[in-house]
Image (spheres, rainbow, N blue to C red):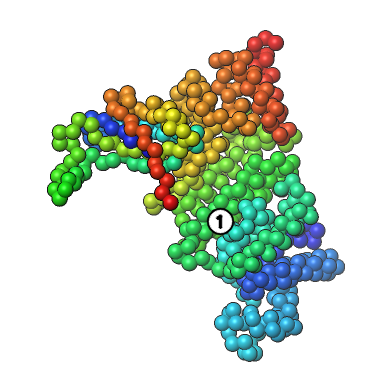
Amino acid sequence: MLVFRNAPVAQRDALTAEQLKNVSKPWQDWIGSIAAQDKLASIGGRLEFDGATVTGSIVTDGPYAEIKEILLGFIIVKTATKDEAIQLAKECPVLKDGGSVEVRGVVQMG
Amino acid sequence: MATGNELIPHLFRTEYSKITVVLARLFGFDHIEIAEDIASDTFLLAAETWGMKGVPDNPVAWLYTVAKNRAKDYLKHDAVFAGKVKLQLQQSATELQPIEIDLSEKNIVDSQLQMMFAICHPAISAEAQIGLSLRILCGFGIEEIADAFLSNKETINKRLFRAKEKLRSEKVKIAFPGKSEIDKRLETVLTTLYLLFNEGYYSISQNTALRKDLCLEAMRLAYLLTENADTNKPAVNALLALMCFHASRFEARTNINGDLILYDDQDAGLWDKELIIQGEYYLNLAAHGNVLSKYHLEAAIALQHTDKNDTPEKWERILQLYNNLLITEYSPIAALNRTYALAKADGKETAIIEAEKLKLDNSHLYYSLLGYLYTDVDNKKAIEHLNSALKLAKSDSDKKTIEKNLDKLLLMIGR
């Protein structure tokens, strides 16, 4: 699983159609590239900006609060080795924006 | 006025299937051979009779009358069988009422649709599904099917026989799947129709007329699905749109010698504008609901190609459609086409990096693509790749295309 994080960015609704295309092309091309190599297991999802954080029995609006980095989204890739997955992660557009990609293996259950 | 000689093969193609499926639905899949035999006998009689007495005023009505009588005779002589059939129809087995054979248009269409679901069943191979479809739904002769598959009569007969046996053992019914099942079963049907169309479109068989027929049959069956409220789903309309767009280029795709003319070299003036408009119509109908099927994406890509203008915007659109298509379902062809679109949209250097990642080492198309990408970038590499492509290419027309490109390159570097 490749998980991307970055500082909260401007809401997508605030972007013009042209800006939106410029933001989404690198992502579409990156995921498309992985899919073209037949290494995409699941498109996962891009996460909505608003949400909630549950700690103990307290629910707060979140995740933004004091957090410098938020979870933006994830995809699941299928590679023979972790190294291969890392190679794919190196091309992720979030890196150009100063964000990060976490590469975690998914444990096969059953 | 058509002579018996031309009329009968034509009628066979359209009416054999109709008679067979109506009787098969009546008798049940277990006795489909009886249905086929009655249909065949009917045409045999037509050939004998019309040759001597001339063609009747209403040939189709003549055929239906004979078929009905033959079926009734069969039921009369086999009371046990007739009882079983009546039970299926939920009539009392002892009622003296004769079984009616309904060859109305509605029953014909319903029977064809139900037969489609019965034949396009995951229990048998895709090849068998197509073979049975061609035989039972499209009235193709065994020889024609053999020609389409570049096979022989014995192989095809065996394949069809085994397929029917398998469907019988799976107790497949000639009936509409229930509402909860229909989407899943429709997936199999659409895959078969897609493959049937591809057989015609990409077939290596030299018989151009036959190949066109395969495509038209696939389109006719898809059209049948759109005419029924339960099966008129967006994916079906998308598939039909896709087929219309591809079919629009029929006339431009082959030259007089039967050689394949590639898209870039085609005379757009020969493209069938009517079919393109039809395709757009079905694509619009497909734009409903929540499901974006691979057929939607392929149809959208095919729509882009109905305009030959080579703009970066068009190729960017095509690139994003291929990205989505690959995310929906991977296929090597889509991966190659995506890389080509990437070259057109973002330049060859970017595309070369992506192409090297694909590693489709067994595909002549992969090396052809690399050859194209390296042309004017590193011509020596381009020639190497085209030579690799030539080694892997199987069909004569593929080899010819690669050799043409190789010659162009060698000329460019002055050899």
Question: x%, y% of residue B397?
Answer: 71, 33
Question: x%, y% of residue B408?
Answer: 66, 18
Question: x%, y% of residue A29?
Answer: 41, 31
A57 or B146, nearer to the observer: A57
Q: Is residue B326 above or below residue B6?
A: above
Residue drawn at 61 percent across, 26 percent down? B367
Question: x%, y% of residue B109?
Answer: 58, 65
Secondary structure, mark 1, is helix
Tell whether B377 sits left or right of A98: right
Query: Which quarter of the rendering shows the C terminus of chain B?
Result: top right
Q: Is residue B307 above or below residue B56?
A: above
Tell whether B216 sits left or right of A20: right
Pointer 1 residue: B189
Determine which quarter of the picture holds residue B160.
bottom right
Query: Which quarter of the rendering shows the N terminus of chain B?
Result: bottom right
Residue drawn at 65 percent across, 63 percent down? B166
Q: Is residue B216 visible?
A: no
